Image: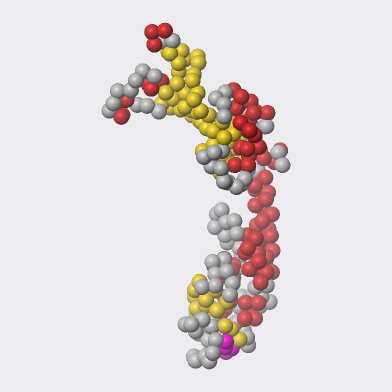
């Protein structure tokens, strides 16, 4: 079928059933039936055979919209319901595309999706992980005092804004200084080595200890080398604290 110029009317019957379209530089092959699935949509109007469509250099119908998000538009038209991948976070932008194409059914589904995500998010637990490397101290004649440990640094991992809110000026963020408040870091540490104080700050802000684990950081047998006496008693410990964020909005 020949077309003149960059715009052309698509005759209703002469366009092949399978049509390749260019949406924002992304190419899709679909059917006219799918594109016209919602008769009240702008897409159905565009492909009803009476509208002049822009054409790209390869003579494909061209739509100047978000080509990546259009994949979700097609999925909706093909299946009749919203299908989004796990962790999808472009709902607001997809709403804009649905509004442009006048897909009211998709708009309703997206609003339900956004509302459900807000409900689900309110049930999430906020978590902060405290990690330490500690060495049991030595007394006279290299007797290990297991009742007291040297804690050189307390590491903190979690949501950036949350960690700063909980630990305030005792949090050193110099290794990740430019992260946004909704980001995540495992590189923070505290400006003190008082583990009890760190736990108390978490407890006073509604956190509870959820899990912990520990292990040795030096294994002279596995490494094939002899460790000094203090390294033999070097351990790491991780403590995970959680709270329900619905209580702290």
The relative height of residue 51 versus residue 107 in the rendered view (above or below) is: below
Write the residue at 32% across / 25% down: 220
Return the residue nearer the eye: 156 or 126.
156
The answer to whether any part of residue 157 appears in the image is no
**Residue positioned most to the left:** 224
Q: How is the image coloured?
A: secondary structure
Q: Is residue 142 left or right of residue 55?
A: left
x and y percent of residue 29 in the render?
Answer: 49, 75
Q: Residue at x 54, y 90 (%)?
A: 5
Report whether 23 appears left or right of 44.
left
Q: Which residues are magenta?
A: 7-12
Residue at the spot x=49%, y=19% of the render?
149
Give how far across and how far down residue 145 sits, in percent: 46, 13
Position of residue 165 in the picture relative to residue 55 (left or right): right
Of 195 and 107, which appears nearest the observer?
Answer: 195
Residue at the location (38% across, 22% down)? 231
């Amino acid at each position: 079928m020949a077309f003149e110029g960059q715009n052309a009317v698509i005759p209703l019957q002469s366009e092949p059933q399978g049509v390749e379209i260019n949406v924002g530089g992304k190419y899709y092959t679909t059917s006219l039936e799918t594109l016209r699935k919602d008769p009240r949509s702008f897409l159905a109007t565009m492909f009803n055979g009476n509208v002049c469509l822009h054409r790209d250099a390869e003579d494909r119908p061209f739509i100047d919209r978000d080509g990546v998000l259009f994949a979700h538009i097609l999925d909706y038209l093909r299946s009749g319901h919203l299908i989004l991948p796990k962790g999808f976070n472009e709902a607001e932008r997809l709403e804009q595309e649905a509004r442009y194409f006048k897909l009211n059914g998709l708009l309703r589904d997206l609003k339900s999706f956004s509302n459900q995500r807000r409900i689900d998010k309110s049930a999430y637990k906020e978590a902060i992980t405290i990690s330490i490397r500690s060495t049991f101290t030595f007394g006279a004649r290299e007797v290990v005092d297991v009742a007291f440990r040297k804690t050189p640094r307390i590491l903190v991992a979690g949501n950036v804004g949350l960690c700063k809110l909980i630990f305030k000026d005792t949090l050193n963020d110099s290794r990740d200084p430019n992260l946004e408040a909704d980001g995540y870091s495992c590189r923070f540490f505290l400006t003190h080595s008082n583990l009890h104080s760190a736990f108390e700050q978490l407890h006073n802000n509604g956190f509870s200890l959820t899990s912990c684990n520990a292990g040795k950081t030096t294994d002279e047998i596995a490494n094939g080398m002899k460790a000094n006496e203090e390294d033999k008693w070097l351990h790491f410990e991780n403590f995970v604290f959680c709270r329900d964020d619905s209580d702290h909005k």
